[in-house]
Amino acid sequence: MVRHTATSVVTIDRFIIEQERLYPSASGDLSSILYDLVVAAKMISNKVRSAGLADIIGAVGTENVQGEVQQKLDLFANDTIVKAMDHGGRLCAMASEEEADIIPIPQGFKTGKYLLLFDPLDGSSNIDVNVPVGTIFSVLKKEGEPGRGTTRDMLQPGYKQVAAGYVIYGSSTMLVYTTGQGAHGFTLDPSIGEFLLSHPNIKTPEHGKYLSVNDSYEQHWDEPVRALMRRYRGLDGRREAMNVRYVGSMVADFHRNLLGGGLFAYPANAKSPKGKLRLLYECNPLAFICEQAGGAATDGHVRILDVQPTELHQRTPVFLGSRGDVAIAQEMLAR
């Protein structure tokens, strides 16, 4: 891996190029996908920052495939990513959390060997109250014969991801991604319009101090989950209490815990017995990043990245973050 000093000024483009040079046989297609995603992230960031000044906040009166009310920025972010990615000749199909079926590459455009899955704007209902939101993406390689991608091509376990990342639109815009060579963070400098390397080789603490969980579901949890949450809060006398921090935006909660140490938990409950969050669009990419930073991710029984998906919009329980804290969930829920 290329080493950079604290005073190095490294753009994300330069970093991607340097990473590519570590693989002499690389075609450059994956790098081009990352470049296009960076452009889309800048466009979405610009629109998010003007949300209070333009007619792009609020709902549009329709629901997505998940049954969630779509926000105007959801649709803008979704369209921006699709238009940035569909013509480059490196993808054979895309899939979005906002759309029921896969997004084919338009006729007349060249297709490639990669698949892109994404959540265009995680936590978008928070836009109206100025809470950070984010974009999450996952890149897979098509297996088998070349050609246009299908739903079946998308149904790969998370350990087969070749790249994953997220963009958080908060007090600053930051992009974190991995290609399996560590997790690296870049902050957008608006004065020059470039993402600059700000968090090289991120390492999350072995044990964390933050617990991110939606307590309003406690009445719907089963007893093992309740016991687990009592453990994290130090109520059973087995550990020091964690501080509860939850804002309802997975990217924002995960990002804080990745840097400061902690656990993001969204267990199954009586209302969502299979879990609430999407395996392919949210949990797999964040689990890949988390593991690359030294953390872990589980559904309470098995490693998230080992789960074999059977549906494009499959849901799952998830516990991800500091390795020691995830191990507690694995131990207590697997009994």
Image (cartoon, rainbow, N blue to C red):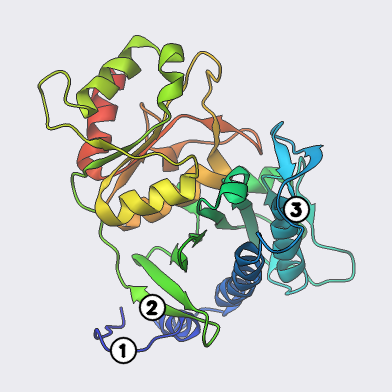
Residue 146 in sight: no
Q: In which quarter of the image is residue 101?
A: top right
> What secondary structure is marked by label 2?
strand
- Taking the spot 28% from the left edge, 28% from the top edge, the residue there is 329
Q: Which mark is residue 197?
A: 2
> Residue 281 appears at what percent x and percent y?
58, 46
- Taking the spot 72% from the left edge, 47% from the top edge, the residue there is 58
- Mark nearest the camera among 1 and 3 is 3
- Taking the spot 77% from the left edge, 53% from the top edge, the residue there is 103
Residue projecting furthest to the right: 108
First-in-chain label (1 vs 3): 1
319 relative position to 280: left or right: left
> Residue 140 appears at what percent x and percent y?
57, 57
* Rendered-image quadrant of the N terminus: bottom left
Numbered-mark total: 3
Q: Which mark is residue 75?
A: 3
**Residue type beneath disc 1:** Ser
**Residue type beneath disc 2:** Leu
First-in-chain label (2 vs 1): 1
Q: Quadrant of residue 321?
A: top left
Instruction: Give the residue pinned by disc 1.
Output: 8
**Residue type beneath disc 3:** Leu
Q: Marks 1/3: CA distance?
A: 37 Å
103 relative position to 202: left or right: right
Does the CB distance between marks 2 and 1 fall below 8 Å? yes
